[in-house]
Amino acid sequence: MTFTRTTLAIAIAAAAVIAPQVQAANRSDDAAARKTEALEMKLEQMQATMAAMQAELSRVKKESSDASTASAKVQELDHWMASVKSAPEGVASKDHLIAVRGGFTNLDHARGDSSPLENGALLSNNSSNQGFYFGGAFDFNVNNDLFGLLDHTSFGVELGVEYDQYGQGINTVSQTYGGVLAGLPATNDYHALDSRLRLSVAPKIKFMHDSKLRPWIIPVGAEINILGVPSNAVSVLNSGMQFGAGAEYDLFKGIVVGSDVRYHYSTSKLDGVPTDGFTTGGYVGFKF
């Protein structure tokens, strides 16, 4: 009995000592849990704040990059405008040409080679087939790549007018029959100037575009011959063709000098009056 009471007393005493300690430990655990929870909340807040700061930093960086790009573009545009303003005024390419031509001409046959009744020698018996010519031409440039077929090769159209003169002959009708009909003696004063006028249009191909020296060809062109002295049938017109080649040199600031040779061929003669032959000479041109 005594042992039981003693044991009980010891147990009560131990409980009295241990209970406060247990309560203190429990309180300590609760405080630690609360601190841990508070730390976790602060950590989450800090993470959210850092995420917000990172997003703001990215936005600022993007805006700064956009502003830098825009500023660079503005500076580039300013630089280009300044270079354009400071550059000398551009000069348009001069590809068209007005030229004055002249030279030597030679017919295949003279007008007075045959009987006056067989050709135009009835109105002019000129026996010379050589003479001179002068005239002008306008070259209209169409393109500088031959319609995309060849680089540095120009295609143009030449419009030309040319006066040819081969000397004088005697108008047989006026000399022989005019005086007889008038009751006057025949004289040798009835001269007829053997002259021609040629109008032409021809395609012209010029090589070596942008070079000072430019050879060229006329593959085939059309022309009309006009006689100063009519044929026996009083015809004054016939059609023909011309073929030509030449070269020109850009001498100084659009002033061009050149030379050419051309052959003129008529599909029909003017009542026997020959118009076939060649011309060769030079020209001075002005580009614009």
Image: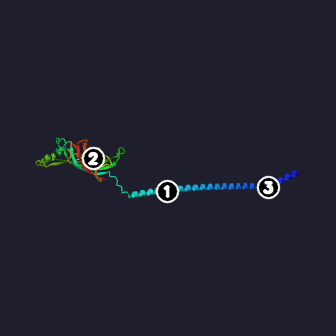
Instruction: Check disc 3 and report the residue beneath it.
Output: 17
Residue 51 image label: none
Return the disc, 1 or 3, that comes first in the chain's sequence: 3
Instruction: Check disc 2 and report the residue beneath it.
Output: 247
Q: Are marks 2 and 1 in contact (CB under 8 Å)?
A: no
Depth check: 32 or 3 in front?
3
Image coordinates of residue 225 in percent, x first then y, are: 24, 46
- Marks 3 and 2 sit apart, C-alpha to C-alpha, by 130 Å
Which residue is drawn at the image coordinates 38% and 58% (left, top)? 86
Depth check: 131 or 268 in front?
131
Image coordinates of residue 261 in percent, x first then y, are: 25, 45
Instruction: Check disc 1 and report the residue beneath it.
Output: 68
Check disc 2: other Cα within 10 Å, few if <14, some if 14-19, many if 20+: some
Could you say whether the residue bearing mark 3 is in a helix, strand or loop?
A: helix
Image coordinates of residue 213 in percent, x first then y, are: 29, 48
**Tag 2: residue type?**
Ala
Depth check: 226 or 132 in front?
132
Q: Is residue 59 above or below residue 122?
A: below
Image coordinates of residue 188 in percent, x first then y, are: 12, 48
Residue that extends furthest to the left in the rendered view of this protein: 185
Q: Which corner quadrant of the image does residue 48 belong to? A: bottom right
Check disc 1: other Cα within 10 Å, few if <14, some if 14-19, many if 20+: few
Check disc 3: other Cα within 10 Å, few if <14, some if 14-19, many if 20+: few
**Tag 3: residue type?**
Val
Could you say whether the residue bearing mark 2 is in a helix, strand or loop?
A: strand
